[in-house]
Amino acid sequence: MENIIISFIENTGLYYFTYKHFVMLLIAFFFLYLGIFRKYEPLLLVPISFGMVIGNIPYPPSMSLGVYSDGSVLYYLYQGVSQGIYPPLIFIGIGAMADFSYILSRPVLILLGAAAQAGIFITFIGAYYFGFSPEESAAIGIIGGADGPTAIFLTSKLAPELIGPIAVAAYSYMALVPVIQPPIMKLLTTRKERLITMKSDFREISKKEKVIFPVGALVLCCLIAPGSLPLLGMLFLGNILKEAEVTNRLAEAAKGPLIDVVTILLGISVGASTQADVFLTKKSIVIFVLGVVSFAVATMCGILFAKLMNMFLKEKINPLIGAAGVSAVPDSARVAQIVAAKENPGNYILMHAMAPNISGVIGSAIAAGVMWSLIGKF
């Protein structure tokens, strides 16, 4: 009887529970709180944080239950992350929801989305300086794009061992856009600049332009950065399904059931990959610090470039929309609108902010393609 009791205890999760598991569960509960009660990107944070709970319930070594246990259910779900399958599928849904009219109406605003990507390359240099390998540095730098799927995709190709901390960092900072960006916006702009109003008379875009753009942009971007093909190919596929109109049924499926199912699977898988013994390391902490620096630098680059553009433009742009150059769609554009509206409730810059916001999605994918093409060879 005594042996049975001892055997039972040794096969419980409590027997293998450590302080590291406790710390990770606290982090998971905090993310659940942010997602459910503070409503910070709940569609991302809730499945990720619940996955963190699943991933940090310890179990006997003889049982194959975790994402790193060959043959377990979570192991097979995690293949969508480790093999870079989920991110392109998510990009189909993003493309089906995206409206490139803002870019086509004011092409000059594309430059703001490109400028924000400078944060990726600056952080890449910083991470390499801190002792990370070129592959790891590239994966850390891409966090600055504030694009979770792109970060996961590039990390799966260059530094798969870092997918857990990088994915959690990327999605955490996407969720915390309303917290991180406003102080940077106010620090780098004057009240006079934040009060700049922009004309709302966007040029009407024809159906022909909307159909030609995704095809032309795909060819041009991927000839420059072939490594971005899996992401941009799916992004523009989703968009042409929407704009062609004859494929509305497919577009609805892409931006509804498809992206919802993949988001759930990706979130659970990423969260479950944060097992205490793998995730709670000094390297993970450094990645989180460099990640927020990368995101902050990307925001700063977008704002500063907008101020630079104003030196040459007759019709001034509100530099707040430069912060939307990071690809956290549509949250960073909304934050730009909120900050502008606090200075003048009648100042409506959301539509203008969407142009650099959407171009930031394309820019971060191109940056990831460039990183993969160059660094993957070494």
Image (tube, rainbow, N blue to C red):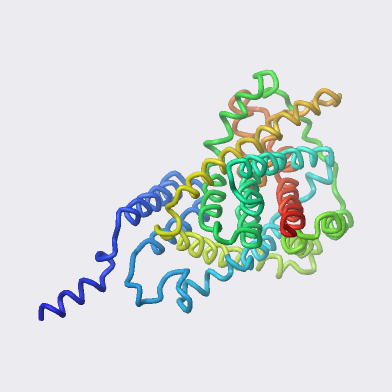
Point out residue 366 in the picture as x, y percentages from the top left corner.
Answer: 76, 52
Question: Can you say whether 7 is above or below 283 in the image?
Answer: below
- Quadrant showing the N terminus: bottom left
Tell me what residue is drawn at x 79 percent, y 64 percent: 245
Which residue is rendered at x = 73% and y = 53% of the image? 371
Residue 333 seen in this snapshot = no
Seen in the image, is 48 located left or right of residue 253? Answer: left
Q: Please determine whether, in this image, residue 72 is positioned above or below residue 103.
A: below
The quarter of the image holding the C terminus is bottom right
In-front residue for pair 78/374: 374
> Residue 129 appears in which quarter of the rendering?
top right
Q: Quadrant of residue 11?
A: bottom left
Query: Which residue: 50% across, 49% down?
Result: 283
Q: Position of residue 321 (x, y in %)?
A: 70, 34
Q: Is residue 133 visible?
A: yes
| Place of residue 344 in the rendered image (x, y in percent of width and height, measured from the top left) | 63, 24
Q: Quadrant of residue 151?
A: bottom right
Q: Residue furthest left?
A: 1
Between 232 and 12, the residue placed more toward the observer is: 12
Q: In the drawing, does residue 103 fall left or right of residue 251?
A: right
Residue 291 image offset from top left, x and y in percent:
57, 43
